[in-house]
Amino acid sequence: MIAHTPTCTVLRVTRPNTLMVRYFVPEMQSTCTFSLCLLGVRCNDHAVQAILDWLELHADYERLALVTCDWVRDSFGRVVGDVLDVRSKESLTEYLIQCGAAAPRGNHLDCVLSDMLSAPEPESP
């Protein structure tokens, strides 16, 4: 179990299932900005507005809890994960499914890991 859940700030919604996120890295005393692909959902065209509505309601001084799958990245290089309300622990992806802006995608992580395993090895110099 994770003792401390890192917090992040969502900078923008870049695609219906992708957020631009800023995360503070204590070891570097700096921030890291990356793309976050929402885990386990297939978003429709209405998802962007639903995400913006959720962020407006749940971002506590722009801080959200960041939940990742050990920093696994998809084939586009996006970190796969979710964001939670710091106080209520409500998940963005659960909200999107409940309001009909996304459909569950139970095999999402399996697909990501399969793509990683089937990728060609880098050539050595």
Image (cartoon, grey):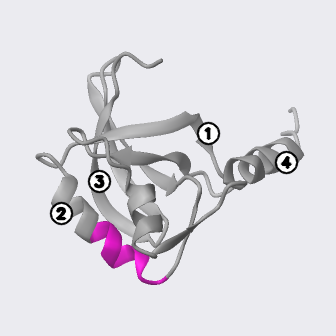
Q: Distance between the residues labelled 3 and 1?
A: 19 Å
Nearer the camera: disc 4 or disc 2:
2
Nearer to us: label 2 or label 3: 2
> Could you tell me residue 65's position as x and y percent?
31, 38
Mark 4 to mark 3: distance in Å?
30 Å
Residue 82 position within the rendered picture, expressed as x and y whole percent measured from the top left: 45, 48
Q: Are marks 4 and 3 in contact (CB under 8 Å)?
A: no
**Residue bounds of the magenta highlight:** 45-52
| Sequence-earlier tag: 4 or 1 | 1
Q: Which amino acid does label 4 sit on?
A: Ala
Q: How crowded is mark 4: few (under 14 residues within 10 Å), some or many (20 or more)?
A: few
| Residue at image mark 1 | 72
Label ID, residue 119: 4
* Residue 49 falls inside the magenta stretch: yes
Residue type at numbered disc 1: Val
- Lower sequence index among marks 3 and 1: 3
**Main secondary structure along the magenta-highlighted residues:** helix
Q: Which residue is drawn at 24% across and 42% down?
A: 88
Give the residue drawn at x 39%, y 72%: 99
**Mark 3 residue element:** strand
Q: Name the residue under label 2.
A: 56
In front here: 43 or 79? 43
Between 28 and 97, which is closer to the camera in this rendering? 97
Q: Which of marks 2 and 1 is nearer the N terminus?
A: 2
Q: Mark 3 = which residue?
A: 10
